[in-house]
Image (cartoon, rainbow, N blue to C red):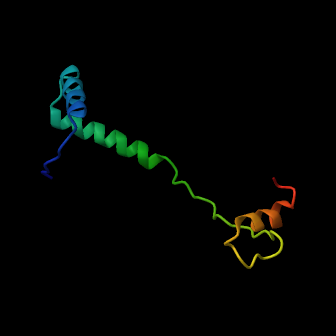
Amino acid sequence: MHITLTLDNDIAARLKLLSHLRNQSFKLMANEVLQAGLNLIESKPVRQDKTYRIKPVHLGAKLQNLDNVAEIIAATEGELYK
C-alpha cells in the first residue's frame, strides 16, 4: 500500500537516525516502528470503567426562597453561622 504520511520533525529525525544505525531503509524502519507500536498498544487490555453511580442524600428541609442567602445559611448552618 502506498500512502503519504506527515511526521513531526523530531519523529522523522529519530527514524532517520535509527534507519542509518541499523543500515535499513527509512520505509522499512518506519514500518517496523509502527508495527512494534501497534503490537504494544494492542497487547494492553482495554480498560473497562466501572459504572458511576450517584447516591442521593437528604439535606434537610427544602428551602422555598433562594433569593435570601443569609436565610439559606441560617437554615443550613444554624443561626450562629456568623
- Most extreme residue toward the bottom is 64
Residue 61 lies in quadrant: bottom right
Q: Position of residue 53 (x, y in %)?
A: 68, 66
x, y percentage for residue 63? 76, 75
The spot of residue 46 in percent (x, y) is: 51, 54
Depth check, front residue: 65 or 24? 65
Left or right? Give the position of 73 relative to 22: right
Residue at 19 percent across and 36 percent down: it is: 28
Q: Against 28, is 71 above or below? A: below
Residue found 15% across the figure and 53% down from its top: 1
61 vs 43, nearest the viewer: 61
Tell me what residue is drawn at x 78 percent, y 76 percent.
Answer: 62
In the rendered image, the vertical position of residue 62 relative to residue 14, given as above or below: below
Q: Quadrant of the rendered structure where residue 66 is?
A: bottom right
Q: What residue is shown at x 57% (from left), y 58% (from top)? A: 48
Q: In terms of depth relative to the viewer, which is nearer, 75 or 20?
A: 75
* Above or below, 40 relative to 63: above
Q: Is residue 1 left or right of residue 64?
A: left
Q: Position of residue 23 (x, y in %)?
A: 18, 23
